[in-house]
Image (cartoon, helix red, strand yellow):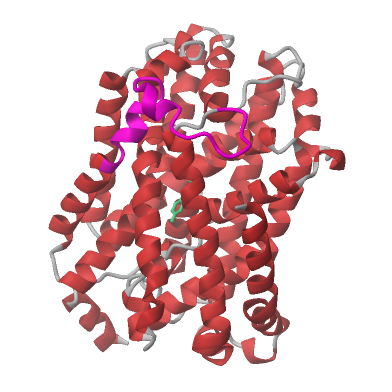
Amino acid sequence: LRQRTKQQKMAGRGNFSNRLGFILAAAGSAVGLGNIWKFPFEVEAGGGAAFVLIYLIFCFLLCFPVMVTEIAIGRKTNKNAVGAFNALGYSKWNIIGKMGIVAGVVILSFYNVVAGWALGYFFEMAQGNFSVGKEFGSYVSNISTTGIYAVIFMALTAFVVSRGVSAGIEKGAKILMPTLIVMILGLLAYSLTLPNAMTGVKYYLIPEFGELNLKTIGGALRQSFFSLSLGMGTIITYGSYLSKKENIISSTVSVTLFDVGIAFLAGLMLFPLVAYSTGGDMSNIQGGAGLIFAALPSVFESLGAGLGSILGAFFFLLLSFAALTSTVSLLEVPVSYVVDEHKISRPKATAITAGVIFIAGLPSLVGNGYSEMFTSFVTYIGAEKPVGFMDFLGHLADCMLLLGGFLIVTFAGYVWKKENLNEEIAIGYEGYENSRVKIFIGFAVRYLCPALLGILFVMVV
Ligand code: TYR
C-alpha cells in the first residue's frame, strides 16, 4: 500500500485522506445548483410531488448501481475517466470517458454562469438590494456584471483544482458541506413559520398522479443523473482517489442520501417561500431558471432590511458554496485526464482547461437576454417556447449523461464482467460475497440498468 501511495505521488496523483474526505467531496460534487436551483423548478415543471417520487425511485434503483460501478472502475485503475478504460484493457471503451470529458466541458460552461449569478446575488443581498428579484431578467442580461462574476467563479474553481485532491478538493468540501447543511436547516425552519407555508408543503409532497406523463418521467430521470454527477466519469475520477480500505457500497449509500436529502430539503424550504410570496396561489408560479432568483429576494425583503439582508446573503453564499464543490468536480474530470495522460503539470493543466471552458461559456453568458440569437437559440420540435442556448446545452448534457450511464453499466455487466466488478467491491466490504447487495448489483448491471436506461433513453430524449 505504501509503495502504491508513493507511486501515486510520483505520478502527480493524490488521494483522499479517508472515507469522510471522499464522501464529502463526492457529495460536494453531487450537491450543487442541481439540488437547490434546478430541482425545485424541475419539480414545478414536472407537476409537483409525483415528480419527487419518481425521482427518488430512479436515484435508488437506477443510479445506485451506476455510482457503485463508477467508483469501482476508478478505484480499481487509479486513473482518470479515459485512462481507466485503457488500464482495464478495453481502450475502445474509453469513448465513454471521452464523451464524459465533453459532457464536463459542456456542463461547466453554462453551470459556471449560473454559479456567477449566485455569487452576484450574494453581494446584492449583502447590500440590501432586494429589487434584483423583480429585475431578474435585466440582471442576467447585463453581461458586464454577470461576466465579471463568471470570471471570478471560474478562477475560484481553478484555484481549488490546481491545489490538488487533498489540499484543495477535500479540504474545501470539509468546510463547505457542513456549513451548507446548517444553513439549509436554518432557512427551512424559518420558511415553515411563514403564512401559507403549508400550501407550499402540500404542493411539494402530495402527489397527483394525473400529472404523471412521459415528460415527468424523463425529467426525473435526467435530474437524477445530473444531480448525482453520474454518467460522465466524475465519480470514476473521484473513485480513483479512494483508498482500498473503504467500502464502496456504504460510501455510495452515504453520497446518495446526502444528495437526495439536500435536494429534498431545498424543495421543502423553497415551496413554502414561494407559497408565501404568491399568497398561497400555486397555480401560476414563475418557474424555470428564475424560480429561486426571482422568488427569494422578496421573501428576504419581507424580513426587514437588517435580518433580510443577512439571511439573503447567507442563502446565496450557500448556493455559491454548493456550486463551487460541483464546479470543482466538473473541472477535475478534464484536468485529471490532461495531467495523467499528457503529463502536463496540474496548475498548468488547470489554467488552460479553465480558460477554454470559460470561453465555451460565453454563448451561455450572452444567451440570457443580451444576445437575441443565443437567447432563443433553438425551438425544440414541438416545444411552445424558443429555448435558450443554456437550456439547449443542459438538455444535450443530460442526454450525454444518460447515454454514458447506460454504457458504463453495459460495459461492467458484459465486457469487464460482473465478477471483476464484484471483486473490486468486495475489497473493503467484509461479507460482500454472500450478501444480497451483491445479487442486486449483478442483476442491475446486467439486466435492470441496461434495459431500463436503454428504453427510457430512447423514450425521453
Ligand atoms: N451534480 C451537480 C449538481 O447537482 C452538477 C454536476 C453534474 C456535477 C455532473 C458534476 C457532474 O459530473 O449541481
Q: In this view, does 439 lie above or below 353?
A: below
Give the side of residue 47 with respect to residue 375, left or right. Answer: right
Above or below, 146 relative to 195: below
The quadrant where residue 64 appears: bottom right
Report the residue at 51% width, 90% height from top: 420
Looking at the image, how many numbered discs can be counted on the residues?
Answer: 0
Residue 208 is situated, as x and y percent measured from the top left of the image, at: 85, 38
Q: What stretch is highlighted in magenta?
A: 360-385
Residue 402 sits above or below residue 114 on the image: below
Q: Where does residue 103 sit, x and y in percent of width and height?
A: 40, 55
Location of residue 456 by image quarter: bottom right
Position in image of residue 145 (x %, y %): 29, 20
* Residue 166 appears in view: no
Residue 85 visible in the snapshot: yes
Residue plotted at (65% across, 83% down): 442
State the residue in front, 141 or 58.
141
Chief SS of the magenta region: loop
Question: Which corner quadrant of the image does residue 79 belong to?
Answer: bottom left
